Amino acid sequence: MINHTDEQNYMSVGAGMNQRYHQHMAEKWQRCDRGFRIAVGVLSTLGICLSSVSAVSDAQSLTAASLGVAAIATCVAIVLNVFPFGEWSQSHATLFARWTDFREDIDQVKFMKATAQQDALARLQPKYHRLCGQEPPADKKLLDRCFEEEEASRVCAA
């Protein structure tokens, strides 16, 4: 049987691991979203410049280059519109906030009297399982790394 301290620690470590994971994932998708938006802008601007120059020039290479850049810009814009990087980032940011709220709740348990600890853990355990059930499929390597980081941070803090 797991004692209250072990149960509280288990849920706190799980919350910390998920906080780290969702923070990484939100940043990853935010970088992708920004990168693709910047690429569309740069490629579109370059395409307009090249097409303007090729319109007044007889050089076939400029025409080919402007068409190539326009095609690449179109592909990047399609990727940006097909893959919802911003939504994915927001989804992970929301899960990060939920795990942060849960961690604040679970970490308060250790400051309670023994009788209140049992009640608090009984109240928080279903919330922990609901949060776990809302988790999207994970990047296993990143999740393992986040778990190791969370465990290491607690060894230093102890």
Image: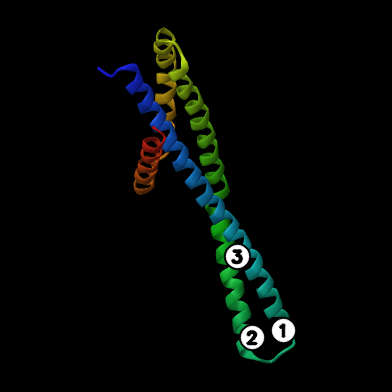
116 shown above or below 45: above
User: Between marks 3 and 1, how big is the CA–CA gap?
Assistant: 21 Å
**Residue 9 in the image: x percent, y percent?**
37, 26
Going 63% across and 62% down the picture, which residue do you hit?
38
Q: Are marks 2 and 3 in contact (CB under 8 Å)?
A: no
> Counting residues from the N terminus, which is met first, the one under dot 1 or under dot 2?
1
Identify which residue, 49 or 158, lies in the foreground. 158
The extreme top residue here reads 115
Identify which residue, 6 or 111, lies in the foreground. 111
Q: Which mark is residue 39?
A: 3
The quadrant in which residue 57 appears is bottom right
Give the residue type that dot 3 points to: Ala
Going 51% across and 36% down the picture, which residue do you hit?
96
Q: Which mark is residue 148?
A: none
Give the residue type that dot 1 points to: Val
Identify which residue, 147 or 47, lies in the foreground. 147
Which of label 2 and label 3 is nearer to you?
3
In the displayed structure, does residue 75 sit left or right of residue 7? right
**Residue 6 in the image: x percent, y percent?**
32, 23
**Residue 17 in the image: x percent, y percent?**
41, 37
Give the residue type that dot 2 points to: Leu
72 shown above or below 22: below
**SS category of the residue bearing label 3:** helix
> Counting residues from the N terminus, which is met first, the one under dot 2 or under dot 3?
3
Residue located beneath label 2 in the image: 62
31 shown above or below 55: above
**SS category of the residue bearing label 2:** helix
User: Between marks 2 and 3, how big is the CA–CA gap?
Assistant: 20 Å
Q: Quarter holding the N terminus?
A: top left
Residue located beneath label 1 in the image: 53
